[in-house]
Each structure stands twice: as C-alpha cells, then as structure tokens.
Image (cartoon, helix red, strand yellow):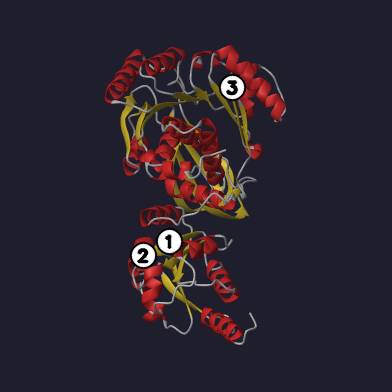
Amino acid sequence: MMKKLALTTFLTKEIQKLRIAVIGDVMLDRYFWGEVKRISPEAPVPVTRIKDMKSTLGGAANVAANLAGLGCRVFMGGVTGDDDNRQILERIMKGAEIDCKGLVKSKNRRTITKLRVLGGSQQMLRLDFEEPGDLTDRETQTLDKWLQGLLAKGLDGIVVSDYAKGVCSAAFVQKVIALAKTKKIPVLVDPKGSDWKKYRGCDYITPNVKEMNEAVGENCPNEDGEIVRMARLAAKKFSIKNVVVTRSEKGMTLVNAKEVLHSPATAMEVFDVSGAGDTAAATLIAAVAGGLKVEDAVYMANRASGIVVAKVGTYPVHRGELLKDVLEEERREGRGYRTLSWEEIGELAATWRACGETIVFTNGCFDLLHVGHVTYLEKARSLGRHLIVGLNSDSSVSRLKGPTRPLTSEVDRARVLAALGCVDAVVLFEQDTPTELIKLIRPDILVKGGDYKANEVAGRQYAGRVEILNYEDGYSTTGLVEKVAKLAKEGKI
C-alpha cells in the first residue's frame, strides 16, 4: 500500500531535482490535420484539406519530452541528420528545456521523420523518412564521450530507448549498462526486437505484450499467468532485475525475483496509444531514480500512461496533470486531500491550453454546497473541456460575509467541490477578488452567476470571454442558515 501522499510529495518537490539521460533513436513526428469531404477524381482515395500542422518529439526524443514535462533535468543523446528536421528538433527541445548537446550530426543519414495525415481524429496516412543502420565508430565514440562527461557531473538515471534504427547497438548498450553500474545508477531499457542479449544486466525493461512474446519466442495471450511466466523466463535468461510489461487495456505487470505486481489500466477514454510506452518508461525511471518504492513507481507510470492515451497524437505527460490525477485518486481512496497550488494550477492550465482544450473558470465561497451550486457548476462545465474553481479562503470569506462565516473550513469546502464530476481542479485564493488568479490561468471562458453584467466581472480582461449564468431559484446558503436557525428557535431540531 502506498504511503499517504508519498507520490504527491515526490511530484511536488523531489522530481524536479532529478538529472536523467536518454539515449536512443531520436525522431521527429509531424502531424497534418485536415478535413475530408470528397474522394479524389484521380484515384479512389480521400482528398484531405490540410488546416493545421504540428511537429512533436518522437521516438527516444518523446521519452525525453515526457521527462521534461515531469520537471526533470533531461539530457538527450542520439544521432540525426544535418538537415532542416534536425533544426526543428533542436527548436522543440530547447523550448522544452531539454539539453540536446548529445545529438550527434551525421553526414550519412537524414533525421528520422514520421509524417502523419489525419482527417478529424482518424489517422489516414503515415510516411516514414528514415535510413536505419549502424553508427560509425566516430559517432559511437562521440556519444560515449558525451555520456562519460554527464556521469562525471552526476546523473540519477539513464533510459535506453531502442527503436532499432542503429543507435542502440549491442556493444554500445552493454557499455552504457556497465558505466551505469560503476556509478550505481539505474538503467531502464525500452526494447525493440527479439534480441535481448544486448540489454543483459539492465535494471528495468519495459516491453509490451508483443515484444515480450518475441523475446521468449512464443505467442501467448495477454493473461496474468502467461505474462508472469514469460517475464520470469526473460528475467532469468537475460539477467534483468525487473521486467515491466505494458499490457494495453490490462494495465502493467512488474515481475522481479521477489514479487509480482499487477497495476490495472486507468484510462477512461482511449483515443491514441502512440507514445504511451515512452510515457511509461519516462515516468518509471523518474520514480525509481527518485527513490520511490517499486510498487509506487509502477502505479505512477500506469497513471501517466492513462493520461496520454486520452490524447490524440504523440503527447508527453506533464507534472501538473499527473499530480492532479494522483491527488484525485488519493481522495477517492480516502487518503487525504489538498488543493492545487497556484504554481501547479498555472502549469496545468498551460498544458490544457497547449492541447487546444477549452478552460472554464469560476469562483465563489461555496459555503454549504447545495443543489443551486451544483447546477451552476454543471452549466459552467458544459461550456468547455475543463472547469477550474477558484475558492475563497476562510479569511477571504470572513471579510466578504462577516465574522461568523464560513460555516465550513476551506479544506472541507475544497474537498466537497473536488468530489463533483464536473469540477477538474480547485485552487484557493486569499484576495477579495480572483483577478490575480485569473491573470495566471487566463481561461477561455470566465463564468459568473447572478445579475452581474459582463463588464463588471473581476478579472474579465484576462479571459477570452465572460458568460453570466442565472442562479437556480430557491437555493442559497443564507436561506439554509435562516431555516435551520428558525427551526432551532422553535425547538424543532
């Protein structure tokens, strides 16, 4: 059982101190989004009118993007071409604060690029631009020198992300593992192919079911007993300490010499499994490098994967999203609750905004939550994808409502609000108005209830637009208090 709030403490503070190196096959993922309304007269294929384009980090670079999104200090090692796509990669990495000094420029190959065309949310076409092949001696020596320099300065963990494009040769991977052992640094391998001899001696390996089957030369079903049996075979055959199998809708299973752990899948909706393995690998190495127990590390990696499969395209998890998810799960399991800090809500809002997801914000005291409040919040949530509630602190409520209020504490009010399915996040503010909080979040829609006019709403200048919603007639905290007082005075309660 997880220690109370161990993961939230780790995600809030410790994870940002970690230094992780990622070594492997770096790729650029390019997405062309469009709409399809007709079939080409030239051939029986759909005509896609492109409306938007996006470039993201793929392959080993997506592992690095996930680690950076989690707040780690990340160092990327690999090989690319000396071309325009290399420049795009560098620009994205610098924007994500990933150190890309370990990316070797090759004259013998192009930057690996995966181009996808999507009509709506459906992938229609994929084009791969790549030239797989072993690295030259000079390229391998350059990577080796880069890694040894990082080890001398101090690392907390290493990920080897193998996509079978040439960087992860047997000799080089074995040297990485040997160097890490001298420094007592954990190495996690995200494997490719059936030849696991080159991964011998690594601390963690994260195959999916297909890769697990290939490694042991069998074709077994995705069932608990068979997965455990195959993982034990592989662990013994290749001297691997921990085998963590990612099992799609069945979650993840960890097998080592002492224990077997099954962690069920957490995603409510699955839109795209692209990059989910990268997310699992990144989160697992961060948790292990940060000193979390192995069961906590697997649990956190599983929850992170559940977040990214609900997105379209290659998408790295972000610390704010994972922290919010873990907090909600701890609340559901009765292990405590706290609101998000301003820093955390700012990061979370920025993540949602970058994904093009509509953010709705409203605020209030919500003292003695009643049906009127719930109806109002449900209406607010229906306006967008995410609803953030700014909650007046106890001192703020007292200044606004008088010294006898609030009737319930800010922690209790926040927890009740967070339990509502329509509320995505709750954050406290001490001020009389939420203007500074709205300035930080910059919601697409600012919602206020009652008879306000849009030009009177505090913080409106920092929102996309203002919506005024009517309160439900016959419901108010004051009315409830007066009713209770009257019944008490009459001796009826």
- The structure residue drawn at horizontal position 54% and vertical position 63%, both measured from the top left corner, is 416
Residue 258 is labelled as 3
List x then y, in percent, for residue 241: 53, 19
Measured in 3D between alpha carbons, the distance from the residue under mark 2 to the one under mark 1, in whole angstroms, is: 9 Å
Nearer to me, 402 or 296: 402
Amino acid beneath label 1: Val
Q: Position of residue 440 (x, y in %)?
A: 35, 61
| Residue that mark 1 sits on | 427
Percent x, y of residue 109: 39, 24
Q: Residue at x 27, y 25 (%)?
A: 153
Q: Residues within 10 Å of mark 3 (few under 14, many from 20)?
A: few
Q: Residue at x 47, y 36 (%)?
A: 283
Whether 260 is drawn above or below 348: the answer is above
Label 2 sits on a secondary structure element that is helix
Residue kind at label 3, given as amino acid type = Lys
The picture quadrant where one finds residue 27 is top left
200 lies left or right of 149: right
Q: Nearer the viewer, mark 3 or mark 1?
A: 3
Disc marking residue 471: none
Q: Nearer the viewer, residue 406 or 173?
A: 406
Q: Residue tagged by mark 2?
A: 437
Q: Residue 262: in sight, yes or no?
A: yes
Q: Secondary structure at mark 1?
A: strand
Q: Earlier in the sequence, mark 3 or mark 2?
A: 3
What amino acid does circle 2 point to?
Answer: Leu
CB-based contact (under 8 Å), mark 2 and mark 1: yes
